[in-house]
Amino acid sequence: MPTVRLSDDQRSFAEAVRAFCDDHCSTLAQRDALTEGGTLANSPQLMAMIAEFGWFGVSLPEEYGGGGAGMVEECIFLEETARGLAPVLAYSTGLTAAQTYLRHGREDQKNTIVRNLAAGKIEAIALSEPGAGSDLGGVRIKAVKSGNDYVITGQKTWTSAAHVAENILVLTRTESTGKKHQGLTLLVVPARSAGLEIRGIATMEAPTVNDLFFTDVRVPESAVVGVVGQAWRHLMRGLSVERLIIAATSLGASQRALADAIAFLKEREAFGQKIKDFQALRHRVADLATEIEACRSFVYDIAEGIDAGYEDDLAVHASMAKLKCTQVAKNTALEAMQMMGGYGYSREYGIEEQVRKALAPPIYGGTNEIQREIISKSLLDN
Ligand SMILES: Cc1cc2nc3c(=O)[nH]c(=O)nc-3n(C[C@H](O)[C@H](O)[C@H](O)COP(=O)(O)OP(=O)(O)OC[C@H]3O[C@@H](n4cnc5c(N)ncnc54)[C@H](O)[C@@H]3O)c2cc1C
């Protein structure tokens, strides 16, 4: 259930999103219908319905078409849609990209991106390359000035939802001299640009990540987001929100896995009794529920801190929340599968889908090893 400190309006919002998800995607048959049998990571139909309610971009400024609320409301939305298994994950990618546009972009960029998100359209962000993942300073894709344009050549990889996006925020190298974190520039590139090939990467989930091949892709100077050569500095700000987005989504995923396991434990019988009465399982449920409640307090503490204006002070806490909540989500999904026995492994009960979904968040958005680096550095190297 939502945290006790939510206001009446926030609680009503949580209940509305929860009821919507229960109505539209609680069963496997409903999710299959929305995702063409589980082959779409995002349902255009569901995204259009949510956009109609005005729930996308709830934390983004009203002047650009967002909802004008705060991070608490955004976390409620992310938590409830993840708990409801709503196939709308690409929204989180766009929300992450939007943070950079809002902080450093031009008015027209903010207007375009936020309005797109609020309308249920998808925006992507391409930082990683084959030779630069955790070590992002190793980015090699080149953007060279040519008259009033930039010409981009090179490769990006793992770009979520690029194949269905309107635009991609691309981290490029505009200068090769100086330190590796210098000379990086962010450019907004329309996903259907001439010279840009988007090729899906086969994974254990429905198609969502892509390789991007840029061959002389031309964008105007006005595509620069922020200041030329300052992308590293731009990306290092606002990380609290980006990490919190993943934490809140993982919190919702954990709750769903535990709720599904509890429902099963109450039904299934073995040795002449409900399996919920085996202490070995009862204690695991208690442990998981306790971990999830700790995650909830953590997520909403940070969300409230951001809403109160302390975002820049919360980056390390947000790293901790990303680390903890993604670990708990992965562990909860695996434990739920184990407690459901063979049924947990079947597609019908939905847990195998949740296990697959829980494996990627510890890797993306800065791996959990990198989060530990950030946390330990803040404690040990000051
Ligand atoms: C489903 C999914 C979606 C993604 N979406 C996007 C996206 O939309 N946009 C985007 O730009 N990227 C995206 N990524 C890429 C993701 O951000 C990278 O995979 C991640 O940053 C790790 O980079 P890498 O894969 O190159 O691994 P590497 O950086 O090569 O790391 C390999 C291993 O070494 C560890 N490691 C590396 N450096 C250190 C260190 N200093 N200390 C300790 N351990 C270390 C890592 O933690 C990891 O376990 C996505 C990835 C996945 C799986």
Image: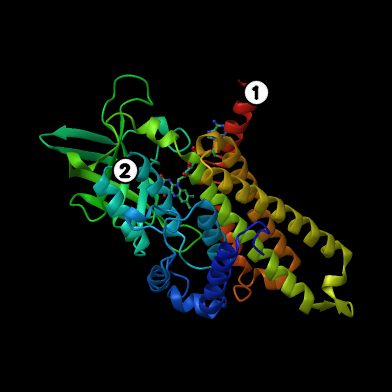
Residue 36 tag number: none
User: Where 21 falls versus 189 (above or below)?
Assistant: below
Residue 286 sits above or below residue 231 on the image: below
Residue at figure coordinates x 63%, y 67% from the top left: 351
Residue 241 % position (x, y): 49, 45
Left or right of 355: which side holds 78?
A: left
Q: Is residue 162 visible?
A: no
**Label 2 Cα crowd, 10 Å radius (few <14 / some 14-19 / many 20+):** many
Residue at screen point 31% across, 53% down: 113
Image coordinates of residue 286 in percent, x first then y, are 80, 59
Protein image colouring: rainbow
- The residue carrying mark 1 is 380
Q: Would you call the spot at circle 1 few (<14 residues within 10 Å), some (14-19), or many (20 or more)?
A: few
The quarter of the image holding the N terminus is bottom right
Q: Which of the pair 103/288 is nearer the observer?
A: 103
**Outermost front residue:** 8
Q: Amino acid at mark 1?
A: Leu
The circle on residue 170 is: 2
Residue 311 vs residue 257, the one in the foreground: 311
In the rendered image, which quarter contains the C terminus? top right
Tell me where residue 115 sits by quadrant: bottom left
